[in-house]
Image: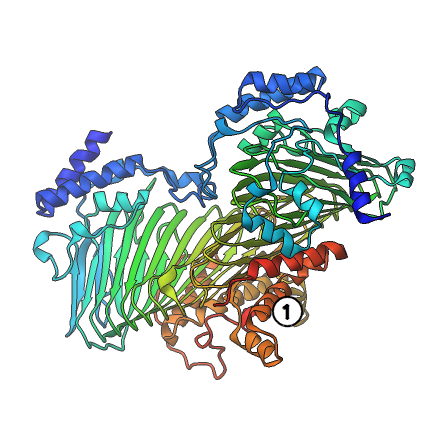
Amino acid sequence: MKWLTLKLIEDISRRLDEGKEELAKRLESYDRFLKLPLETSPLYVKYVDPKLAEVDLSTLKEADSHIDWPIPSNVAQILYNGKCVVRLSAEGVRLQTIGGIKERVDGVDYSRLTLGEDRFSALIQALYTSGHILIVEKNTVIEEPIHLVSLVDRSLVARNLIILGEGSAIKVVEEIYSPNPSEGNVFFAYSNEIKLSENASLELTTIQAAAPLSKLYNIRRTSLGRNASLDWVTAYLGGAYQLARVEHRLVEEYASVKDTHISLLTSNQVLDLTTDLIHQSQKTSGSVVARLALKDSSKAIAKGMIRIPFEGKQSNAYLSQHAIMLSPSAAGITIPGLEILTNDVKATHSSSVSQLDEDQIFYMMSRGLNKEEAIKMLTLGFFEHALVRIKRQSVKEGVRHMLDEKWRGRLATFKPIETAPPRVEKSGAEDIFEGHYKYR
Amino acid sequence: MEPAKLFEEYKYDFKDPIDQYVHISQKGLSRKVVEEISAIKNEPSWMLEYRLKAYEHFLERPMPMWGADLSNINFDNIRYYVKATERVGRSWDEVPEQIKRTFERLGIPEAERKFLAGVGAQYESEVIYHSIKKDLAEKGVIFTDMDSGLREYPEIVKKYFGKVVPYNDNKFAALNSAVWSGGSFIYVPEGVEVNIPLQAYFRINVMNMGQFERTLIIAEPNSKVHYIEGCTAPIYSSDSLHAAVVEIIAKKGAHVRYTTLQNWSKDIYNLVTKRAHAYEDATVEWIDANAGSKVTMKYPSVYLLGRRAKAEIISVAFANTGQHIDSGAKVVHLAPETTSKITSKSVSKGGGRTTYRGLLYVGKGAYGVKASVRCDALLVDDHSRTDTYPYNEVYEDNATITHEATVGKIGEDQLFYLMSRGIPEQEALSLVVTGFFSSFTKHLPMEYAVEFNRLIELEMSGTVG
């Protein structure tokens, strides 16, 4: 088994025209993948779903395939099983795929990028064959969202890169679907590596609607320069198992990140989410919000950490994890952590696991809704708190629609939906602490 | 009577005859040491077997890697059993200046200072101070040390010993189960309410001596008891280990409160397992304060096993230079309509580190559970540290659990206000910190609260300038 994989790694490296160094890096990463335990942090050893450990590498096979996918109207790149099928670029924007040394981009040396001491980081680094690269030149401002679509029907390992130059500002919608899912045990391991230079701003919405049987392993690493801002909202809808490990590094002062995770889990779905917020510089601001609703026998494990070292003075940090239990066989685990090494900071978290409020259900029913409708409306309302963080109305409406479809047991495809903005909408943008008792 | 005379009597009362058998075990742990401890105490064979099983488990069990740094514990350099009345032959001059000063600041009487510093009469491992009011004894309340408890009430002890904290619970519970000595044994019969807090002082004052006391509290249905352990005076010793086990059984409708004030000297590893079982309608409260020790790892826990059982845990930590207080709470909800509340307050200063580590567990079928956790941490300066690691596990849809935590510094406006009223900065700082701890101190008997506030004032000194 092992030699088969080693041969596969050599094949990949040759196909991508890599040098000796890159191959050595891949082999070393594969070695680490074999050695590392499922969870390396002593804080979380007990809190990881063991089923995530089974990664069937024999499903990684090359095959030619073809897809008809509607061609989008604005800037976009669509990869089908790792191959580029659509690329629409614009001035100031470079869209590429990771796939070949010849496409190497200035200032990015893949062999030196290390995802981290983590089993799945190692897996991705050993076996990646494709991925989106989006590079935005400095001072480029684009209003319309750029779509990065990954269509995945069989096992795939990919690295996605977004790099924003100084003063640039863009919006990205990242989408993951399985248009013709192959049967059986398919996994998709992928990273999102994001680097924002000084004053850059990125609004990112990720929609994961992969095949219901697939396993997804997502490693996210971001690095923010001075006064850069990242606003990321993720909706996890598809897949049987989703692991997501997120690490935000606020490297320079005034950097700010808002990271939002939304999930409506049904049947036997498992979401294993780890978020790390690291305030490496002073006056940075970070906020992580997770809103999870659990139906049927689903399970969610939300692990979050705020780290403020001595250098992170005068930083503000907030972490909130809220889960709604909709079934007696669901399981919800939240672990909101803080590691604070200096005093002049505001750092706070709140977490809850609870059921819907009986009084609210009763109220809705007294207005003529049946119980199922009342529960649905309250659950979708529970997500609103997180959805307000999607600034663009058409994207927000599109995600709302997908959540609604998911409630009915369907995985929809994202479509921006233009509606007139409501006259009154609560904005969570002002206060990152969301009225936490300490800072009310 | 003159106070001095009183003390003479007090001293006399607790002085054992010189020819009494004195035993200090050799340093280090072996099967032989465990057998020896059991033989000296003339224990029943089941206890020896239990000790030996625990010893085997202690050897097999790896050191915990998830918490504080325990790499400096040298298990071979610890005495596992010290009988009372051994004179160490240390003089008052050998007691460090800092400890002497502390005694002075806390207002501890001269004679008692010597006792605490290990210069006066020596009373180790075994509990020597007990005051059962006569009327309590008449009500059938048993309050004695654990060794006597085992001798005099073997059936009760055998029935409950190790049932709440089994020997294989963790490495240090295994160690305690193997070499335990001393501790309190309390039995409160059905319907009896003990109105005064029962108190015990444990003291480590032989150098390099380990303290492995074992406490067992059984509260029969509808009884009520409040137990207090510890004292606020620092207890002097060189590198040492304190690994206690406390087991509480609160039966139907019983109410048990266990208060701890921990101020071990700042080179002690304090690794304690405290757990309670609460049955139907029972209430268990842990009021736990940690100010001393080099490293503390202690997470008082309550297993709510009967309908409507209730748990309240107040955990307070103050870490100064060189200290790491890793404390918290665990509540396991295994029955319907059970409720719990955890409050944690911590202050870090001078590079000290406090950690809150807690678990809230709601098992399947434990419907109608309500649980809340609130952690507040205060950092006095910019190079101290605080961590929060709360674990919330819920396997039941009809449950509500919430957790909130916050970290901050002392508000400039609070200080400014106090100083504008003519209070010097130093005092203002102390006031803010004692105020921060008030949700804890209000649960203490008055004399303890006064001592605790004085201790905080002392620990806060030197903060300004």
Give x and y (percent) for residue A90: 16, 73
Query: Is the residue marked by circle 1 packed among few (<14), some (14-19), or many (20+) residues within 10 Å?
Result: some
A414 left or right of B75 in image: left
Q: Residue at coordinates 61% horizontally, 75% vertically from top-left?
A: B423
Which residue sits at x=56%, y=27%?
Answer: B79
Q: Quadrant of residue A304?
A: bottom left
The amino acid at mark 1 is: Met
On screen, A95 above or below B335? below
Determine the residue positioned at 55% across, 72% down: B425
- Residue A148 point in image, percent of width and height: 25, 63
Nearer-the-camera pick, B139 or A402: B139
> Above or below — where is A168 with respect to B205?
below
Question: Is residue B73 positioned above or below B443 on the image?
Answer: above
Element type where label 1 sits in the image = helix
What residue is disc 1 on?
Answer: A364
Q: Residue at x 69, y 58 (%)?
A: B441
Residue that extends furthest to the bottom in the rendered view of this protein: A423
Instruction: State the residue in front, B21 or B266.
Output: B21
Left or right for B11, reference B365: right
> Can you see residue B358?
no
Query: Do we see residue A433 in this rendering?
Result: yes
Question: Looking at the picture, how far across and down is residue B373, in whole percent?
Answer: 60, 56
